[in-house]
Image (cartoon, grey):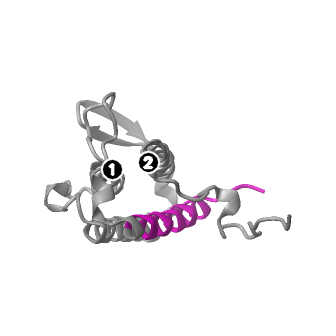
Amino acid sequence: MEIQLNDLIDYTEWERGKWRDFFLKHGDNILSVSVGAHRDGRFETIGDWVSHIFSAEMRYIDRLTSRPLTDPASIPKDSVDALFEFGKRSREGLKKFLEVEPAGGWDTPRDLQILTFSISATPKKIVTHIVMHEIRHWAQIATVLRLNGYVEEFHDLLGSPVLGGAWRRANA
């Protein structure tokens, strides 16, 4: 038995829904929480980080489909609705790519320019990276928010509806 890429895509969609609900519960101001003094310079706030997750997905698909790179600068990073609408569009782009990429193309390396790096990777590896990149960043966001007093419930794959099963508190 192996986990399929679609299972991880389903998991990240569930994860996005949980985060959207959490952010809406706390209001747009939560997006202005600082990611801390030791950030890497690419983003300063939670809103910047969420934008980064969605724009990375969009831009990888732009590269794989030879489209001009999407400029996320016009997406407000202080609006839950605007950010997650952007995330919806990026995910639609990913799903469209999955539908149209020929089976024989998944294992054929593509040469991409990403910032100052030249990358050679297969679409399979790039799409897997997109999903793992998102999973990793949501976990980092959860940690930063927890350190700032915002506690969210578990987002583990084990507790998600993906791949079946159930997650509930045992009777005490």
Residue appearing at x 34%, y 65% in the figure: 87
- The quarter holding residue 67 reads bottom left
- Which one is closest to the eye, mark 2 or mark 1? 2
* Span of residues in magenta: 1-23
- The quarter holding residue 110 reads top left
Mark 2 falls on what kind of element?
helix
Q: Distance of mark 2 from mark 1, alpha carbons?
A: 8 Å
- Looking at the image, residue 63 lies above or below residue 44: below
Residue appearing at x 65%, y 57% in the figure: 157
Please tell me how crowded label 1 is: few (under 14), some (14-19), or many (20+) other residues with Cα within 10 Å.
many
Q: Is residue 22 visible?
A: yes
- In the rendered image, the residue lying farthest to the left is 74
Mark 1 falls on what kind of element?
helix
User: Which residue is tagged 1?
Assistant: 46
Q: Are marks 2 and 1 in contact (CB under 8 Å)?
A: yes
Is 10 part of what is drawn in magenta?
yes
Rendering coords of residue 127 (x, y %)? 46, 53
Residue appearing at x 71%, y 67% in the figure: 163
Please tell me how crowded label 2 is: few (under 14), some (14-19), or many (20+) other residues with Cα within 10 Å.
some
Identify residue type, mark 2: Leu
Q: Is residue 27 left or right of residue 161?
A: left
Residue 145: image tag: 2
- Label tally: 2
Residue appearing at x 33%, y 68% in the figure: 84
- The quarter holding residue 21 reads bottom left
- In the rendered image, the residue lying farthest to the right is 172
Residue 100: image tag: none
The foreground one among 134 and 97 is 134
